[in-house]
Amino acid sequence: KTSILTPFATSQGQSKDGKRMALFANIAMGMEAGSAFGRGAEGIGLFRTEMLFMDQEQAPDEDEQFEVYREVIEAAAGKSVIIRTLDIGGDKPLPYLELPEEENPFLGYRAVRMYPQYQAMVETQLRALLKASRYGQVDIMIPMISCMEEVEWISQLCQQCQAQLQAEGTEVGQWRLGIMVEVPSARYLIEKVAGLIDFISIGSNDLTQYFMACDRGNRQVSSLYDSFHPGFIAFLRDIARAAKSAGLELGICGEMASDKRALPLLLAMGFDEISMSAPSIIPLRAELAKVDFDACGKLLDEVCAQGTADQVKACIEHFWQQQE
Ligand code: PEP
Ligand code: MG
């Protein structure tokens, strides 16, 4: 069956005037990778590994994880694969971890913050990832980074796991380390940790929550929880500039990445990849092909000068009307 979208099923994401921006897929299970590539994904921008650890009596062992990561990497056949290490705790408990009840779980003990206590579990995941890198490059991404010590700690642990595997006679392939920028303080780490990492990916869901001080699941404040707040757009632009000047690859993997309204702004900021649920990829690639890079830059300036999220959205709506 052919449609007006058919040419965008296999092409690479680029604007009308040829500025590249790749469209990647978010997945939560290994077996989703094949269908994501079938739906036009140019890479996997976020593999959320939590599902692997949930609904079990204990954490999955190294072999079990290795098989899943290998499945994804083999499905990618040379395309990028970003796999996020465990993002759990607080609101997302695991039965086999002893996590305290917290008054503010979103501000509490979660993700990378609990890694030192559960170091053996983290090492198992890193070893499985490094082993899987034999089948294609693995980009390892760490969630909820908020300070330099966390990046140093995990970077060292990756090196240690690699040395251990090699000492055991196990081959390790190409891998890279990256961090999610989803806590505002991570903005000011970019220059300082650039030597330890290769890429960043913006978690706009949590970054909006922490930037606006607004629970992402609380309906009473849902009008404030808005990624189109002009301050938030300006913050993203600043993060993007910092990442580019530090020579880091730049991606985004929150809900905002699949929003057509954000597309011209993200292009103007220079994102290398935007990652979303697979069904959005082909339609969004068709939208991307309608816009010019320079016009998107003008829109971005205009948007950042607005006072309210509604004004931002009105500017964007006007922009899209002119593209038709
Ligand atoms: C995010 O915070 O934007 C993100 C991609 O991570 P999650 O939605 O899994 O918290
Ligand atoms: Mg997040």
Image: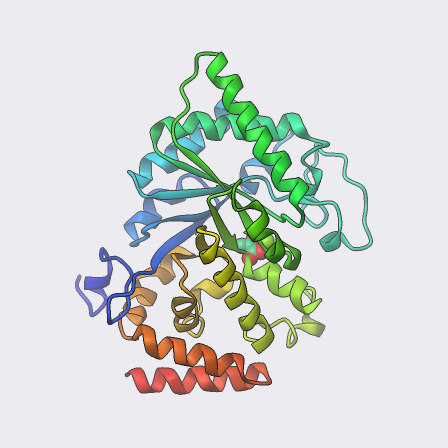
Task: Name the residue furthest left.
Answer: 2
Colouring mode (rainbow / by chain / secondary structure / one colour): rainbow
> Is 99 located above or below residue 295 in the figure?
above
Asked whether 46 or 166 is in front, the reply is 166
Q: Is residue 34 left or right of residue 277?
A: left
Q: Quadrant of ligand 1?
A: bottom right
Asked whether 301 or 204 is in front, the reply is 301
The residue positioned 44% from the left and 82% from the top of the image is 316
Asked whether 93 or 203 is in front, the reply is 203
Residue 225 place in picture, x, y as percent: 63, 71
The residue positioned 60% from the left and 74% from the top of the image is 231
Quadrant including the N terminus: bottom left
Asked whether 221 or 23 is in front, the reply is 23
Q: Is residue 66 visible?
A: yes
Q: Is residue 91 left or right of residue 122?
A: right
Q: Quadrant of residue 82?
A: top left
Residue 322 place in picture, x, y as percent: 32, 86
Q: Is residue 235 left or right of residue 211?
A: left
Q: Is residue 60 visible?
A: no
> Is 110 located above or below residue 229 in the figure?
above
Q: Is residue 272 left or right of residue 112?
A: left
Residue 187 place in picture, x, y as percent: 60, 57
Q: Quadrant of residue 283?
A: bottom left
Residue 142 place in picture, x, y as percent: 56, 43
Quadrant including the C terminus: bottom left
> Is 56 located above or below residue 16 in the figure?
above
The residue positioned 30% from the left and 64% from the top of the image is 285
The residue positioned 50% from the left and 68% from the top of the image is 237
